[in-house]
Amino acid sequence: MAARGIIWGMLLIFSFMPLWSQDLFEDATRSGSQTGSSLDLGGYLRSALFAGRALNPEDGQIKSAYGEFSLKLKAGKPGFGRAFAEFRGREGMEFDRPLKGFFLREAYVEAYWGGLDIRVGHQIVVWGRADGINPTDNITPKDMLARSADEDDRRLANFLVRATYNALPLRFEGIWIPFYRPSRVPTEFISFPADIRFEGEAYPTARFVHSTAALRLNFEFSGFDGSLSYFNGHNPFPALSADGTENAVPPFSTGFLPIVLRSYRMHAVGMDFSSTLGSWGLRGEAAYRSPHGDYSQDSSIIHPDLYGVVGVDHEFSAGVSVILQYLVRRVWDFQELARPSRPDLLPAYQLASKNRLLFSQQYETSHALSLRAAKMFWHDTLDLELMGYLNLTSQEVLLKPKLTYSITDAFSLIIGGEWYQGPEDSLFDLVDPYLSAVFGELRLSF
């Protein structure tokens, strides 16, 4: 009953939105003329449908179907500060389960003191200059299973304090994250043997010793942008860990190995840049990660690794824009996992295998390519985009075509698809039956 009342309340709000927003913005305009403050409202309404094959290849399945609204509030006073909030609500079905809820995607206040800006609240932070794949982007978590035509919807917010000092061409940035919030990882789609049982989460409590800190120095020169960064804290992407023990060593008193999602601390030193060479754009990014714990004794801790991306982008005369990137990952102290002959050692081996899959550390050195190509048609009302990813080492492939038709400036139709493919027991092979789908979306922005 409470949910029904909320829904009817929102319908009434949107019914009176034209009159209410007119009065509100008239008041904001009058207030702005007197005090210099501003207040803006915006957002969207959308409906989305994702469909693909079921686990039985002969059947089709609705992967996700929902209606969603977003309400965005921007307020500010020039020279003093600003605030932003986005509230979303949705209802539908996803992965055969009800999908409903109202949540605050972001809400923060930012204050200005000369060249110093301090932003406090629930916010999303994006680091890195590469396209879509950012080794230095470890600040806020992601929802790896988000069903949306907008890639940005994978990003999740966390409460943090962010301070930026502008001394152009340099910009210093410091971040403190007091609470841990994990990324959503596809554990629900990973099958575990009978002697391994998934039992939930075990994340750090809200203590100072568990908080995270990060620093970044940005260079903003004419024709060249870059940064150096340092991260010290819990990786937002958690791992599978033996519950109550570090080593997952048998015998197990319960008869099975209980595992949980657990975070681990790490250092990460990174750099990125973007520049131009004639009409071509150049970009690059790299990060070296080193864990705090003993990865040789605990398979839920990553090995030290170096992950780098370098790419070029260009807009051709036919109006086709292309971004091509090369990716490489090097894992230190790498050793092949050998399947044990003793049955009682199999759970520890299987746990280590699953973690390497999630860490993308199945190989000592791996190479991949990513491509994003786009072209506009029909007087820039039709946007065709193709995103592709190919892991040359693991032979995993991802294709994401998307077509966006702007019916009006505020009303659009989006159709597309996602296709994951990989060898047996690879990560893309595991998620393919669940995430591969075609989709359609209608969106009205206001």
Image (tube, grey):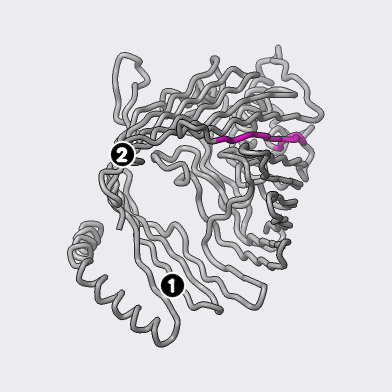
Q: CA distance from mark 2 to mark 1?
A: 31 Å
In the picture of the structure, the residue carrying the numbered disc 1 is: 75
Tell me the SS state at disc 2. strand
Residue under the image location 20 percent in, 71 percent down: 19
Q: Find residue 337 and report its horizontal and vertical position in percent.
A: 72, 19
- The residue range painted magenta reads 301-314
Amino acid under disc 1? Ala
Let me know if residue 307 is in the magenta part. yes
Q: Is residue 66 visible?
A: no
Which comes before the other along the chain, label 2 or label 1? 1
Q: Answer with left or right where residue 234 lies relative to residue 47.
A: right
Q: Is residue 217 visible?
A: yes
**Are the two marked residues, 2 and 1, in contact with CB atoms closer than 8 angstroms?**
no
Tell me the SS state at disc 1. strand
Q: Main secondary structure of the magenta part?
A: strand
Amino acid under disc 2? Tyr
Q: Answer with left or right where residue 198 lies relative to residue 439.
A: right
In the picture of the structure, the residue carrying the numbered disc 2 is: 405
Residue under the image location 23 percent in, 66 percent down: 17
Residue under the image location 39 percent in, 66 percent down: 73
- Neighbour class for label 2 at 10 Å: few (<14), some, many (≥20)? some
Query: Mark number for residue 335?
Result: none
Q: Find residue 235 and report its horizontal and vertical position in percent.
A: 65, 46
Quarter assignment of residue 351: top right
